[in-house]
Amino acid sequence: TGNRPRVTITSNWPETFWAETLTLRCEIEGGGDSEWTFGWRRDRTSRTSKYTTDNEYIISQAADSDNGDYECSGRRGSPHSTFTPWSEPFKLTVTQITPKAELRADRTSIPAGGAVTLTCDVNPPSSGWTYILYRGDHPGTQDDGKNFNGRISVSKGGVYRCRGVRGEPVYYTEYSDSVTINIILSNRAVVTLQPHWTEIHSGEKITLRCEIEGGDDSEWEYEWETTSSDRTVRQSESFEITATSYSEGEYKCKGKHKTELLSSTPWSTPITLTVSEQKPKAELKADDTYIPVGGYVTLTCDVSSSSGWQYYFWYRADKSSNPSSIHEFSSAGQKRVSKEGLYWCRGERGNPVYYTEDSNTIQLKENTVANKAVVTLHPNWSEIYSKESITLRCEIKDGDDAEWEYEWKTSNSFKPPKEKEYSIGPADTSHSGNYSCKGRKKSDQSPTGWSDPITLTVLSSSPQPVLTVSPLWLSPGDSVTLNCEVKHPSAGWRFYWYEAIPKHTHWN
């Protein structure tokens, strides 16, 4: 017969995957309205036992064994049948994998009220798919799914998956890997320290706390990240560490909302802990080693390497006595003492208390010298002008000059020699400042106390004399008073007067 059969596939995609159902159709060219029955064979080795009126050949759950060349032929007429030739072979290849969906997000963290675009594709690439998007509040949960065309905008946080679907009966790809979308809230997380210092020493205890601004503590769960070597997973609001070198690094936290799942604050600004392996040592200083008669010496204790210390001062009257505390904690680190003896201190901070090493010791002696030192100026002007000269003298009341050595201290950069007198000239503004002195007996080195400071001021401007006349309006024979003074009031001036004789012009 001239009718030629042709095998076609009913789907609109060329590829067939493992376990997919497909339908082959036998179409006879020019077959007209005649009633045909159809026969099938594969690889020219098999043939249906009989022709049927169904022109479709259905392969359910395609497998590797279904690969081959499929042909069909038609038959009509009875009792004498007419057969068409066999069709050209239709080659069927079953891809032995189940395709998998791939879900992508243009970003995974969005601010509250924002949105993210999700895109679903099938791998390996193939055609004919529509897609279903699934959402869960956490991994392992998902809703019933929502059909979409492969691209969708979502504004709700969650764990998302997708898969592709095509054909009838429906064929599904494998689920995609999950994509977690987080909602970033406007609340701010802040890491705080208790105690508040970031420079700590090995063995100290410190508590880190994650505080959420504008939130109730009961609403939040917590997550921490650190660059330190301490990789302990922490999910509480606060935690305590005993510092070691492993604790050194940055710490940051964020809050996760308990009811608004997958909604969290941004990460806090990191706070950096620095850990010193060496135990700090306090340093003790005294403004003098001799306690003046009826006076005191100021002790200063300091731990310069870090902050937050309170200081405890200790005292021993002599080598045989037991040490005793002489002062309660002082955050200023200063103590006035008036007893001679051996002094030292230490720093303490934190809870439980962390101690520094004891400081150096300082031996203080009571001064037996009652003489008092006084600074005097010669001439006795506390204000002078630049390029003037002046002498400061250290005078010891009721003392013989031959008995004493002298020492000076100033509030400026000049250090006068250890002599009774200090001459300045020509002076400039850098000589301005406070000057104090004390004497020390040559025989036993016992000192006086420091004198009261005297202030010297050196003015940079030049003095300007001012001449005034009274009265200003005169009649012939009247008396007049002339007055000369220095514009800036100061002492010690002598005045010189000059008379100017006007030159007369004679007319011829």
Image (cartoon, grey):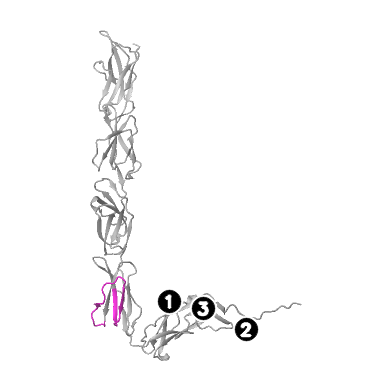
Query: Residue 329 shows which numbered tag?
Result: none
Question: Residue shown at 23%/52% (left/top)?
Answer: 218
Q: Amino acid at mark 1?
A: Ser
Residue 325: in magenta span: yes
- Mark 1 vs mark 2: give the one in front: 2
Of residues 488 and 108, which is closer to you in this image?
488
Q: Which element is circle 2 on?
A: loop
Q: Mark 2 is on which residue type?
A: Gly
Placement of 20 over or under 308, stated as above or below: above
| Element type at mark 1 | loop
Q: Which residues are magenta?
A: 317-345
Mark 2 or mark 1, which is nearer the start of the sequence? 1
Q: Which mark is residue 411?
A: 1
Examine the rendered structure and indicate whether residue 408 appears above or below residue 172.
below
What residue lies at 23% left-to-right and 40% top-to-bottom?
141
Q: Quadrant of residue 149?
A: top left
Along the viewing direction, whichever of 268 and 250 lies nearer the viewer: 268
Measure the C-alpha gap from mark 1 to mark 2.
Answer: 59 Å
Which corner quadrant of the image does residue 98 belong to? top left
Examine the residues drawn in magenta and state their main secondary structure.
Answer: loop
**x and y, in percent, of residue 327 in the image:** 26, 75
Q: Which mark is residue 385?
A: 3
Mark pair 2, 3: CA separation: 41 Å
Q: Residues within 10 Å of mark 2 (few under 14, many from 20)?
A: few
Frontmost of labels 2 and 3 is 2
As drawn, the label of residue 477 is 2
Element at badge 3? strand
Q: Quick one: quadrant of the C terminus?
A: bottom right
Distance CA(mark 3)–CA(mark 1): 19 Å
